[in-house]
């Protein structure tokens, strides 16, 4: 069974942001890397919500960040147990580093950016695996 187009769009955007986080990290642009890492994970979480049939809460205009985080944790960690409990804090931690990168005077360190990109990579890859497994597409 094929992945629905709307899920594919968000997964592709997630992959693009993950690639940007990697590239920016290796170019020494740690703030941008941390920001893109958050968006990679956020867009993958949106893809997972769409995959599960969750409609956009605002009439199809935007995905609220708090809603995405809360619904992801409630539906896929607490209820269905598709992801380990430590994933409950991933989006929040990535968002905190993104806020530092985008809005604070103190920049994101190399170590924080590295943590962001590795957390995002693990999160995105796991979501892709779950979606493929549930669609019967295998690895």
Image (tube, rainbow, N blue to C red):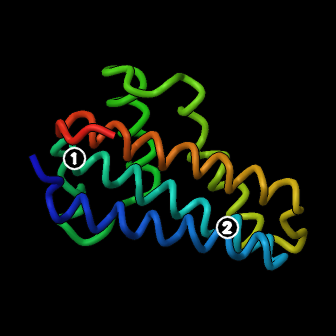
Question: What residue do we see at 54% from left, 32% from top?
Answer: 88
SS under mark 1: helix
- The x, y position of residue 21, in whole percent, is 65, 68
Question: What residue do we see at 28% from left, 42% from top?
Answer: 131
Res 105 label: none
Residue at mark 2: 22
Q: Is residue 52 visible to the viewer in this orientation of the structure?
A: yes
Where residue 57 sits, quadrant-wise, is bottom left
Q: Residues within 10 Å of mark 2 (few under 14, many from 20)?
A: many
Front residue of 34 and 106: 34
- Cα separation between marks 2 and 1: 26 Å
Q: Is residue 126 left or right of residue 54?
A: right
Q: Is residue 135 left or right of residue 100?
A: left
Front residue of 137 and 97: 137
- The x, y position of residue 20, in whole percent, is 60, 74
Give the residue furthest to the front: 139
Q: Is residue 71 left or right of residue 104?
A: left
Question: What residue do we see at 39% from left, 39% from top?
Answer: 72
Circles 2 and 1: CB atoms closer than 8 Å: no
Mark 2 or 1: the one toward you: 2
Residue at mark 1: 51
- The x, y position of residue 32, in whole percent, is 71, 75
Question: What residue do we see at 60% from left, 69% from top?
Answer: 36
Where residue 87 sits, quadrant-wise, is top right
Q: Residues within 10 Å of mark 1 (few under 14, many from 20)?
A: some
SS under mark 2: helix
Where residue 102 sits, quadrant-wise, is bottom right
Q: Is residue 103 visible to the viewer in this orientation of the structure?
A: no
Front residue of 3 and 39: 3
């Amino acid at each position: 069974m094929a992945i629905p187009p709307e899920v594919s769009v968000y997964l592709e955007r997630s992959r693009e942001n993950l690639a940007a986080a990697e590239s920016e990290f290796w170019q020494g642009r740690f703030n941008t890397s941390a920001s893109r890492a958050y968006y990679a994970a956020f867009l993958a979480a949106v893809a997972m919500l769409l995959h599960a049939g969750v409609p956009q809460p605002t009439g199809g205009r935007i995905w609220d960040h708090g809603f995405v985080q809360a619904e992801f944790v409630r539906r896929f960690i607490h209820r269905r147990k598709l992801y380990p409990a430590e994933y409950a804090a991933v989006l929040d931690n990535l968002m905190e580093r993104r806020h530092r990168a985008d809005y604070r005077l103190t920049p994101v360190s190399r170590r924080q950016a590295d943590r962001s990109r590795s957390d995002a990579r693990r999160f995105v890859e796991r979501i892709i695996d779950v979606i493929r497994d549930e669609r019967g597409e295998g690895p």
